[in-house]
Image: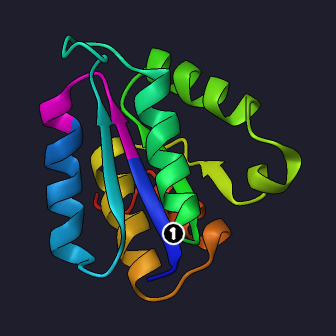
Amino acid sequence: MSGVALVIVSHSVQLAEGVVELAAQMAKDVALRAAGGTDDGRIGTSFDKVNDAVTELRAAGHDVAILTDLGSATMTVESVLDFLDEEEAAHVKFADGPLVEGAVAAAVTAQVGGDLDAVVAAGRARELFS
């Protein structure tokens, strides 16, 4: 499977997994990975979890859109993006939008064949479900 995949970054393991579960209901063919909580299971974010999810999806041939829940998760994602070389950075983008609505919209856009820019734009949209 190729196309655009999503990484869901949350301070909570359960929240990240729940968003992945919800988005998967709408986009069964899209690769989704949860990167929630710290490495030792506490509330927070983990550079390694985000980086590992991106690395796994890129190794499978996917472009990757990343969505986050709160500001410090965004800082973690920005750190991961800073460590990518220029070639990889062209295939991994941050979608700064609402986590749940953005993840569903991005996943559906990926499901119907949207490219990375279209998926990121869908993930950033703030008024899709209002």
Q: Which residues are magenta?
A: 8-15
Element type at marker 1? loop
Q: Position of residue 114 (x, y in %)?
A: 55, 81
Q: Position of residue 47 (x, y in %)?
A: 50, 23
Question: Would you identify the image quadrant in which residue 44 lies?
Answer: top left
Q: Position of residue 46 (x, y in %)?
A: 41, 21
Q: Residue at x 51, y 80 (%)?
A: 2
Q: Residue at x 46, y 76 (%)?
A: 110
State the residue in front, 70 or 79: 79
Q: Is residue 11 one of those drawn in magenta?
A: yes
Q: Residue at x 68, y 36 (%)?
A: 81
In the displayed structure, 62 sits above or below 21; it is below
Q: Amino acid at mark 1?
A: Ala
Q: Is residue 130 one of those drawn in magenta?
A: no
Question: Would you identify the image quadrant in which residue 9 lies?
Answer: top left
Residue 107 is at least partly visible in this image: yes
Residue 124 is at least partly visible in this image: no
Q: Position of residue 40 (x, y in %)?
A: 23, 12
**Total numbered labels placed on residues in the image:** 1
Q: Which residue is mark 1?
A: 60
Disc 1 crowd, CA 10 A, few/some/many (<14, 14-19, 20+)? some
Name of the residue lying farthest toward the bottom: 112
Question: Would you identify the image quadrant in which residue 11 lies?
Answer: top left
Q: Residue at x 47, y 15 (%)?
A: 72
Left or right: residue 43 compared with residue 86: left
Q: Which quadrant would the C terminus be assigned to in this image?
A: bottom left
In the displayed structure, 27 sits above or below 64; it is below
